[in-house]
Amino acid sequence: MRHAITLDAIRVLEAIQSKGSFAAAATALHKVPSALTYTVQKLESDLGIVIFDRSAKRAVLTPAGKLLLEEGLVLLNASDQLQDKVQQLESGWEASLTIAKDTVIPDQGVFEVIQRFCQLNKHVEITVMEEVLGGGWDALHSHRADIALGVTGELPKGQFTVHLLGQLEFVFAVAATHPLADFVGLIESQHINGYPTIVVADSSRTLPTRSSGLFSSKQQIRVSSMQSKIQAQIQGLGVGFLPLHLIKAQLASGELVAKSCAFPRTALPIYLASEKGKSGKAMTWFIDEFLQQDWFK
């Protein structure tokens, strides 16, 4: 099926509209005016519409012509972007990249890296997903993500390339208004039995879920991110261990109070992981940048 509207015809309409006359548009497009006249007349004949009002000195689009040009420019821009993406893909740059970020990783650092990437002027669509605990591994395993940032726990064998980002340190923290804030001495299990604990739920969809830092308490309140857990504890809703690097400001301001306890949580190795066999230029660039970032400052 032959389509009356072509990308070349849209370019002709755009040139006539912007230059104000067929002659000026022909000069800009390096064509003779008769070629543009033929293109417009044929388009009008095929569509059964009038595109330009020729009664004035300046070529003016009719309402139908305006609609044709407005919608046509969308197609023209999409075509240009498609061409750029195809050429970029051929050069080794992926069309898209998905990063599964655990909620223990600060947004600011990720956005700083993305901002630097944007300065490269590569047309790569970047998606950032938030995951918790086993969710990052699950995102890689199910091919929902290309890079998992901030994964912890037992490392899968052979399937992924893994890089150590550092050690995740935890502190037992309560709100300044919580009854335990004024407790003197080492907190034992029996001291927290009467209070709720705030727990971040695992976001894994297909792999087995896991829990982290659980202990006996009056009840558990599950939230979907580490940021929600921090806010819940600031408000005194419950107690629990929190990543030190995410609550330094709240500890300094006194919103949260760190307490010594008889069951300290040891530092946890945290990793960046990617699927073996994938080696696009965007993935390689992001992995290099992520490994240079100080995530726990």
Image (tube, rainbow, N blue to C red):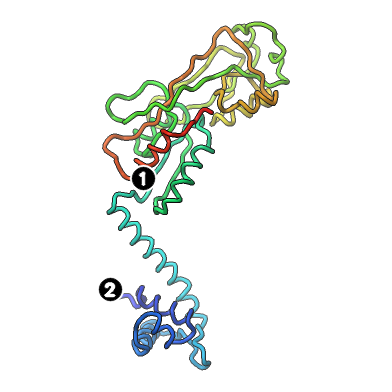
| Residue 172 sits in quarter | top right
Check the picture and name the quadrant holding the N terminus: bottom left
Judging from the image, what secondary structure is the residue with disc 1 in? helix
User: Dot 1, how many residues are within 10 Å of its Cα: few (below 14), some (14-19), or many (20+)?
Assistant: some
- The answer to whether 110 is drawn above or below residue 86 in the figure is above
Relative placement, left or right, of 51 versus 189 is left
Judging from the image, what secondary structure is the residue with disc 2 in? loop
- The answer to whether 173 is drawn above or below residue 149 in the figure is above
* Residue at 34% across, 33% down: 141
Residue 277 image offset from top left, x and y in percent: 26, 37
Inspect the image, locate mark 2, and give the three-letter code of the amino acid beneath it: Met
Residue 99 image offset from top left, x and y in percent: 42, 39
* Mark 1 lies on residue: 282
Q: Which mark is residue 1?
A: 2
Inspect the image, locate mark 1, and give the three-letter code of the amino acid beneath it: Ala
Between the residue at mark 2 and the residue at mark 1, the CA separation in whole angstroms equals: 39 Å
Relative placement, left or right, of 39 versus 158 is right
* Residue at 49% across, 30% down: 295
Relative placement, left or right, of 237 versus 282 is right
Closer to the chain start, of discs 2 and 1, is: 2
Q: Which mark is residue 262?
A: none
Residue 40 image offset from top left, x and y in percent: 39, 85
Residue 53 image offset from top left, x and y in percent: 50, 88
Name the foreground residue: 245 vs 274.
Answer: 245
